Image (cartoon, grey):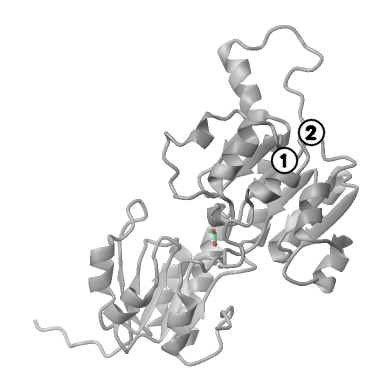
Amino acid sequence: VQRKMSTLPRVFVTRQIPPEGLKILRDSGQVNFELWDSDDVPVPRKELLEKVRGVDALLCVLTEKVDAELLEAAGPKLKVVSTMSVGFDHLSLEELKRRGIRVGYTPDVLTDAVAELTVALLLTTSRRLIEATHEAKTGGWGTWRTLWLCGHELANSTVGILGLGRIGVAIAERLAPFKVKKFIYADVAPRPELAASINAEYVSLDELAERSDFLAACCALTPETKEICNRRLFSKMKNTSIFINTSRGGVVNQEDLYEALATGQIAGAGLDVTVPEPLPTTHPLFTLKNCVILPHIASASYTTRNAMSALAANNLLLGLQGEPMIRELKL
Ligand code: DGY
């Protein structure tokens, strides 16, 4: 039997995304979508370039580079790109804008999960939990010792936020009950409304480095923030300070961070993001006791990943209908 050619808009979904989003696409009856049916292996670039040919919309995750090459391969029918992420550094915004392609992303729904993980990573790093469990398990646990495995506490500390947005505020709200003395932040401009809710003071980048006992990078990766956490910044930090990054690995110069950690310029670092990802197991950062590395899991709760999936699907459908998306990037 010959199947009638569907006239529905064609969509390519680059991952087996969590079920809520797939259900929304399926139940909408509005799109004819093809799925890269794996979550373990990203679609190979060559295959992706073939799959996007002639599609009306693309639903992607952060492992897909949406650049001029991909947009050329897709062709002029492509009207909507919906990414299941709050980060958009994998998208060439200029190329998308030039072609009038609308872009959906998934802020807000992951703020709680990311803030929660950031606090967990901060405490894990500052109180040296990974080292501690290792010592307990491998015979390093001798008698109770007065200065053994001592770390740095949040009480009475100054917490610095690099890039104050939704996530930075949510982190500060969670840290405040730990008796943080002062929140400070650096950004391209003051953000009085956001800052007011956490009573945070706007400071220069240098001052952020100098005053922070804990410095959390919460900014988007852009040409301006690329490797903004570098030797210059680390050299201004206190020897007792902890650096935390749950934004993008690209905001850090990793050689400079290694140096700062290995020489004791700073006390420790907790990273949920690196360059590249996955970070090779032979990477020097893995040799440091004072560096905790997680495999990019800040938003990884079942609730949040499903919400991201649903939002990405809804953004895509609304975009195809010519309606305002729930969360659309202003290009
Ligand atoms: C994002 O959404 O950009 C995160 O890095 C993954 O949740």
> Judging from the image, what secondary structure is the residue with disc 2 in?
loop
Ligand 1 shows up in the quarter that is bottom right
Q: Is residue 317 visible?
A: no
How far is disc 1 from disc 2 in space, using C-alphas? 8 Å
- Graded by Cα atoms within 10 Å as few (under 14), some (14 to 19) or many (20 or more), the crowding at tag 2 reads some
Position of 189 with respect to 15 (left or right) is right
Instruction: Tell me which residue sits at (53%, 59%) in the image.
Output: 305
Q: Residue furthest top?
A: 143
Residue placed under numbered mark 2 in the picture:
152
Q: Nearer the viewer, residue 147 or 34?
A: 147
Q: Amino acid at mark 2?
A: His
Considering only order in the chain, which callout, 2 or 1, is on the residue closer to the N terminus? 2
Position of 285 with respect to 18 (left or right) is right
> Judging from the image, what secondary structure is the residue with disc 1 in?
strand
Asked which quadrant contains residue 28, the reply is bottom left
Asked which quadrant contains residue 217, the reply is bottom right
Q: Nearer the viewer, residue 215 or 326?
A: 215
Where residue 172 appears, x then y in whole percent? 79, 55
Where residue 87 appears, x then y in whole percent? 55, 65
Whether 265 is drawn above or below 131: the answer is below
Q: Quadrant of the N terminus?
A: bottom left
